[in-house]
Amino acid sequence: MAEATTAPAPPRLTPATHTTRRGLAVSSFCLALWGTLTFWWYPFGILIASLGATFALICIVMGWRGGKDGTHLAWYSILLAGFGISLAVFSYRFVQFAFDGIQPPFPLPL
């Protein structure tokens, strides 16, 4: 008579098993913060903030949370990266207008 085999038990989920998922969410927040803090460095700040936003979108799609109590650091990263990118674009346009005399391609309401 054949013996019934049982499937092995799944590995226990410990805080150490989710370090990669938390790490990607935390890195997206750090990149968004660094891109916001270096917004005046035109191509670098936008690139770093965009990379943080990309990582944050991956975390949101995959459902990975990054905080200790399950907070969504990826959503904070999206907000921070958007703020940094908009600061960079507006400061770059201001410098073009103030020092080079280049008019923005869109009308500004004044």
Image (tube, grey):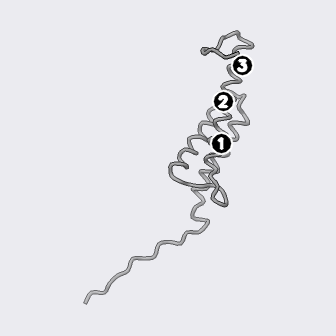
Residue beneath disc 2: 86
Of the 4 image quadrants, the one containing the C terminus is: top right
Which sits in the foreground, 24 or 60? 60
Q: Nearer the viewer, mark 1 or mark 3?
A: 3
Give the secondary structure at mark 1.
helix
Rate crowding at label 2 as few (under 14), some (14 to 19) or many (20 or more) other CA atoms within 10 Å. Answer: some
Q: Which quadrant holds residue 19?
A: bottom right
Q: Is residue 6 above or below residue 34?
A: below
Residue 59 location in percent, x, y?
Answer: 55, 49
Image check: 54 left or right of 29?
left
Q: Amino acid at mark 1?
A: Leu
Q: Is residue 90 above or below residue 48?
A: above
Q: Nearer the viewer, mark 2 or mark 1?
A: 2
Q: Residue at x 59, y 51 (%)?
A: 24
Furthest toward the left, the residue is 1
Residue beneath disc 3: 94
Rate crowding at label 1 as few (under 14), some (14 to 19) or many (20 or more) other CA atoms within 10 Å. Answer: many
Q: How many marks?
A: 3
On residue 16, the disc is: none
Residue beneath disc 1: 31
C-alpha span from label 2 to label 1: 15 Å
Residue 87 location in percent, x, y?
Answer: 69, 29
- Ranked by sequence position, the earlier of labels 1 and 3 is 1
Give the secondary structure at mark 2.
helix
Residue 26 location in percent, x, y?
Answer: 64, 51
C-alpha span from label 3 to label 2: 12 Å
Q: Residue at x 73, y 36 (%)?
A: 37
Q: Amino acid at mark 2?
A: Ser
